[in-house]
Amino acid sequence: MSDIGSALLLAARLVLGFDAELVGIVARSLQVSLTAVFFASLIGLPLGAVVAVYRFPGRRGVVILLNALMGLPPVFVGLMVYLLLSRAGPLGALGLLFTPTAMVIAQTVLITPIIAALARQIVRDLFEEYREQLCSLGARPAQMVPTLLWDGRLALMTAVMAGFGRATAEVGAVFIVGGNIAHVTRVMTTAIALETSKGNLALALALGFILLAIALGVNAAVAMLGGATAHGRG
């Protein structure tokens, strides 16, 4: 118990003292995850809205596929991106493997279906609510999509934050394609796994506390946005 207490005390000192190594890992984690969320949102939000508004053959299959892909195994995503970026892969000449860019690609692939599936549900509800009004104005599906995305921007932020929460907690995919290289591709989740295996519980705990704080902050923001959206509709 004394060892655990000492580790907790040292972890608190690392956090409160803004330890350089700790800050570097956290900053790298946020940079990778936020970049991945940005690209995933650019793809996922319009995709979800299009699937919600347009009627086309195979639409139900696309909906089922999006929902299924929300549970993509991270290690599988990491393996596929690794094969794509490896020296023998089609994009191997770019030299992206074991770089932050490779980690961004893996996280983008992982969270795009989450954002798209949640966006489809949100836009579908808005579409059902405003369908008659939009049709009476002569709006076409291509015009409805940006209108509904803008009108549902607060609710859609919950989808984006869900993707961010998933990205920050990811370990398998980023470890495979990033390699957990110190000062290059080491992020919070991979660092926690490494430092725990080394017995450096203080740094692992400090990173764990920050990761927990981020998760709580994301959940609180989602709850606040959900309440604001419900209040706005009311």
Image: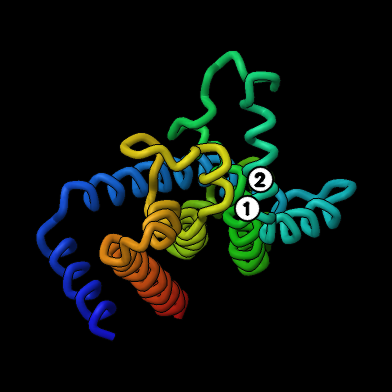
* Residue furthest out toward the right: 57
Q: Nearer the viewer, residue 97 or 35?
A: 97
The answer to which image quadrant residue 181 occupies is top left
* Residue furthest out toward the bottom: 1
Q: Nearer the viewer, residue 228 or 211?
A: 211
Q: Nearer the viewer, residue 222 or 192?
A: 192
Residue 215: percent from the left, percent from the top? 39, 68
Secondary element under disc 1, as helix, strand or loop, is helix
> Where does label 2 land, which residue?
77
Residue 161: percent from the left, percent from the top? 45, 60
Crowd around label 2: few <14 · some 14–19 · many ≥20 (10 Å) = many
Q: Amino acid at mark 1?
A: Pro
Q: Residue at x 75, y 59 (%)?
A: 68
Residue 92: percent from the left, percent from the top? 62, 19
Asked whether the residues under the numbered discs 1 and 2 touch, taking CB atoms below 8 Å apart as contact, a structural biologist would say: yes
Residue 26: percent from the left, percent from the top? 29, 51
The answer to whether residue 139 of the structure is visible from this angle is: yes
- Which quarter of the rendering shows the N terminus? bottom left
- Give the CA separation, mark 1 to mark 2: 5 Å
* Residue furthest out toward the top: 93
Residue 102 drawn above or below residue 16: above
Crowd around label 1: few <14 · some 14–19 · many ≥20 (10 Å) = many
Q: Residue at x 49, y 39 (%)?
A: 179
Q: Amino acid at mark 2?
A: Val
> Where does label 1 land, which residue?
74
Secondary element under disc 2, as helix, strand or loop, is helix
Query: In the displayed structure, does residue 63 sit left or right of residue 124?
Result: right
